[in-house]
Amino acid sequence: MTDVTILRVAVPTPALDSFDYLPPPDATTAPPAPGIRVRVGFGARRLIGLVVGHGRESQVPLHRLRPVLKVLDSYPILDARDLELLCWASRYYHHPLGEVISAALPKRVRQGHAAARDGIILWRLSERGRQPGPGSMLRAPRQAALMALLGEHPEGLDSTQIETRLPNSRQPLAALEKKQLITKTSRPCLDVLDVEPVPAPSLNADQRAAIDVIVAGFGRFNPMVLDGVTGSGKTEVYLTAIAAAIEAGRQALLLVPEIALTPQLVARFRARFSGPLALMHSGLSDAQRHCAWHMARTGRAQIIVGTRSAVFTPLAAPGIIIVDEEHDGSFKQQEGFRYHARDLAVIRAHLWKIPVVLGSATVSLETLYNVERGKYRRVRLPARARRLSPPSLETVDVRRRQLSDGFSPLVLEQVRRHLESRDQVLVFLNRRGYAPALVCHGCGWAAACERCDARLTLHAGRNRLCCHHCGAERSIDPRCPACDGAELLRLGEGTERIEQALKAAFPGVSLVRVDRDTTRRKGALQDKLAGIERGAHQLLVGTQMLSKGHDFPNVTLAVILNIDQNLYSSDFRALERAAQLIVQVAGRAGRGERVGQVILQTHLPDHPLLEQLLRGGYEAFSRAALAERRLADLPPYRHMALIRAEAVRRNAPMGFLRRARAILSNSRKARVDLLGPAPAPMERRGGRYRAQLMLIGGQRSALQRMLQEGVPMLGKLPEAREVRFTIDVDPVDTL
Ligand code: ADP
Ligand code: ZN
Ligand code: ZN
């Protein structure tokens, strides 16, 4: 014990814990409080860290502790409760604290820039710069490139946007400004809309009941599940609850799966609230993100809408957290710091003592289990808000049927019927490209990725073979490289082929395809969605980009083409995901005046899942699926973690995980089963071999204790030098 305050500082390094430092020697003021950034010497480097606590003792002898070099903030940039959330997440996910904190802060703040930021400087061409002449005569190539870039962006670009397109642009920017060819303007961080808000509809009784539960729970931890089919009015409930929170002087945080996929949702928020709204998603520039972050933490943004990482956005006065489509897999980060934003939202609401609403038409089995155990309260919205009947769901058995380009004639007949009555038809297929395999008819050779255990997908539009796992691509073989045969078959269907087949079957009908390939250009997705809404297209073909969130009132038929691959998958969550997908796609059909029809084309019409879903809907399915998980001793009845390892050398991950297993079983006190290690289902990906060790136990605390004791030792193993490993607590898949 000393009377010196020791600072616990988290620095962005792979160390699991914080490091001890002394306050700056010359300081006459109090030592920097938790939540304040400091610059520290770390080995030979200088890093920016965050004070996460104070102490009186250290494992390191006092004379060997170094003082921090500089204190960067006068006030904490994070509230104590949010700091606690990050520490909790670091412990629970067994991920280095410094990296967890980095994930929560905008890059500019991590780099040590001032935390406050009140606007964005935008550069654009000046009056003079737009004239033909001086700008185009520039001799300095960097300046000319910058002029050209700004010429393409009359709306203006901020410095980070410029930097990502043209690195090292500082000097040319200054030079051009001096020549008065460009000018800068400052735009405030938040646009406050100058429109008369659209009034809310009067809520129905179920919606009112939901609101009453939420509002009665203001000011305390009140987790609620809003369970209602697509179109039942959940978003209206969110909007009303948020209005109530704002009315009470508080902020609302809404998490959504992908903002790019939900322009309609954002538009509804914009229409209802003229007040300041901040969007947080991966499409922002660093400056924009910093701005939104600052507006949220100072309370100037009343509503924060964001994707996964927005769960960490600091708020001055949090009032409510809402997670829309809580079942969606995108809330789980799938690399590095593998947190689940929905679960962290609940923890955060608990720390802040505020209500949290988890909304979905296809509530996840974990969440339903928490309802069963009485941890979450469930409120249902049983009917579609505008009194529409639910879509009818049917299967079309394609066993022993002749398919043409993946379509059964029966299905094509139905498509024709709906097109003839001038309705829209959606064809869903979870695979992009033309064909998932290129196979030699002579010898059976199939084009495979050199870096993955996977076939290459043929993309006809780009005339390339592409790997959907590592991004590798190459030209299409004209002949078989194994037997020199010339007959290469394009097996199976992707969206491109479906598009072609439908165009051939229904010439003259306007078709739009929505998948990652057709929406790369910024704004392309919005344009296509707007076209669908306008009725410019009658046939819609797409991947899950089309299955989420959109409201297409004129779609009366949805066809799901290849659900079978989900039904065959070895992953224990595959059936749950299949059911959610079917119900979500079905939810797109018949939101308008007419009853919708949904057709599943399948080789497995007798599959128990499909039968349950058809007979009893998602409710019946989920009850049966939970019972099955209980029997099989799987999550959510038991708790799971995976240690995933990968390396260039084939045997390295298995060797490492065998040692890991030995260490973990040594530290075992309670009952946790260790399964494996085993190679991952796709063993090689991106040139690396992968393996995993599964931990599964009846008690979360026992599993956590085992990881807590074991994980710090793993990094020190000699075998660890060759592998990259991550801890995946509550994995969403085991693939
Ligand atoms: P969900 O989010 O569950 O899919 P929405 O909130 O988007 O449902 O509601 C579906 C449609 O019904 C929307 O067009 C919405 O404006 C409308 N709606 C929702 N609640 C009401 C209500 N109480 N009165 C009239 N229309 C409503
Ligand atoms: Zn061949
Ligand atoms: Zn690959």
Image: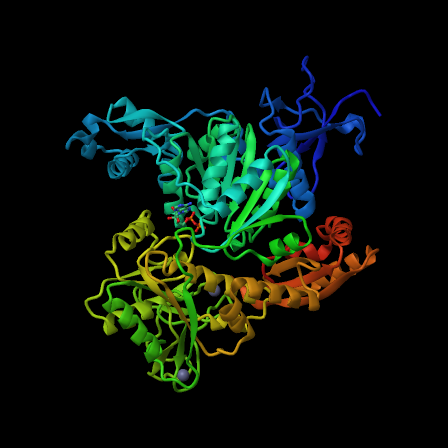
Query: In the figure, 48 relative to 428: above or below?
Result: above
Q: What is the x, y in percent for residue 406?
A: 36, 76
Q: What is the x, y in percent for residue 646?
A: 61, 60
Residue for point 39% across, 58% down: 588
Between residue 150 and residue 354, name the one nearer to us: 354
Query: In the figure, 588 relative to 312: above or below?
Result: below
Q: What is the x, y in percent for residue 349?
A: 61, 38
User: Which of the 4 quarters of the picture holds residue 158?
Assistant: top left
Between residue 443 and residue 270, name the one nearer to us: 270
Answer with left or right where residue 683 lies relative to residue 295. Answer: right
Q: Residue furthest front?
A: 205
Between residue 247 and residue 579, name the one nearer to us: 247
- Quarter of the image with the N terminus is top right
Q: Residue furthest left?
A: 132
Residue for point 64% across, 58% down: 644
Between residue 635 and residue 496, name the one nearer to us: 635
Residue 103 in sight from this viewpoint:
no
User: Which of the 4 quarters of the picture holds residue 2?
Assistant: top right
- Quarter of the image with the C terminus is bottom right
Residue for point 58% across, 22% down: 73
User: Which of the 4 quarters of the picture holds residue 265?
Assistant: top left
Q: Residue furthest top?
A: 28
Answer with left or right where residue 300 lies relative to residue 312. Answer: left
Q: How is the image coloured?
A: rainbow
Answer with left or right where residue 532 lies relative to residue 693. Answer: left
Residue 569 in sight from this viewpoint:
yes
Q: What is the x, y in percent for residue 303?
A: 47, 34
**Image mark count:** 0
